[in-house]
Amino acid sequence: MSFTVAIDGPAAAGKGTISRAVAAHFGFAHLDTGLLYRAVAARMLDGFDPVVAAQGLDPAHLERGDLRSPAVSQAASKVAAIAEVRAALVDFQRAFGARAGGAVLDGRDIGTVICPEAEVKLFVTASDEVRAERRWRELAAGGVDTTPADVLAEIRERDRRDSARATAPLRPAEDAFVLDTSRMSIDEAVAAAISAIGERQ
Ligand code: C5P
């Protein structure tokens, strides 16, 4: 039997950390759908047409080391506004969500478009400043030379683009459980997510 957990939210809200922890806790598979758009963006920056890149996306493209760079982040939110790019990625994501044994998918449109029938939908958010600070620490730890102010501007620009696009804009599903992690530790946020999911199991 399938059991699908949809986790959406703006950039750097903690979706990835929460999704990995939840998947490990329940023994579910996890798909970071942002990586698909990042891989298409990286191929576009290499000179490929983004629609062709999305239609021909290969697992090897998801393994590249540069997918978390700020340049790829911005390009990802640009290719993600192209309806044909999104359409090319739908079947893979839906099949992942329907797999036996349970699946967690995190992204922007999982609860609204990809898996509207998901058993559990979480919308994970936090204030812009908190998200920027967390992402800046992550980037700095990974050796990326940037400032909290630049990261704040970067995620605001991406959120604006992701929320304003016509196809599958970023927004909580009507039946999503909204988890504001601004004042929570990682452990508290993970515990809240696990309890929301446990209630519906
Ligand atoms: O989640 P992450 O920040 O890695 O996603 C990168 C970009 O990919 C987002 O800014 C968004 O534009 C796009 N995306 C999307 N739909 C998803 C996941 C990511 O549009 N389900």
Image (spheres, rainbow, N blue to C red):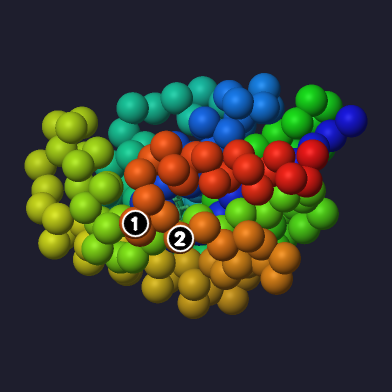
Between the residue at mark 2 and the residue at mark 1, the CA separation in whole angstroms equals 8 Å
Quadrant of the rendered structure where residue 102 is?
Answer: top right
The image shows residue 58 at horizontal and vertical percentages of 58, 29
Q: Nearer the viewer, residue 27 or 142?
A: 27
Residue closest to the far right: 1
- Residue 89 appears in the rendering: no
- Residue 186 appears in the rendering: yes
- In the rendered structure, which amino acid carries the disc numbered 1? Arg
Number of numbered labels in the structure image: 2
| CB within 8 Å, label 2 to label 1 | yes
- Residue at x 50% of width, y 40% of height: 190
- Residue at x 78% of width, y 46% of height: 200
Q: Nearer the viewer, residue 50 or 160?
A: 160
Question: On the rendered structure, is 152 left or right of 14?
Answer: left
Quadrant of the rendered structure where residue 19 is?
Answer: top right
Tag on residue 61?
none
Question: On the rendered structure, is 159 left or right of 95?
Answer: left
- Residue at x 39% of width, y 40% of height: 186
Quadrant of the rendered structure where residue 126 is?
Answer: bottom left
**Element type at mark 2:** strand
Q: Residue tagged by mark 1?
A: 183
Locate the C terminus and report the quarter of the image it occupies: top right
The image shows residue 63 at horizontal and vertical percentages of 45, 25
Q: Residue tagged by mark 2?
A: 180
Disc 1 residue lies near ligand 1 with CB under 8 A? no
Locate the N terminus and report the quarter of the image it occupies: top right
Q: Nearer the viewer, residue 173 or 143?
A: 173
The image shows residue 53 at horizontal and vertical percentages of 54, 43
The image shows residue 68 at horizontal and vertical percentages of 33, 39
**Element type at mark 1:** loop
- Residue at x 52% of width, y 31% of height: 21
For label 1, the crowd category at 10 Å Cα-Cα, with few meaning under 14, some 14 to 19 and many 20 or more, is: few
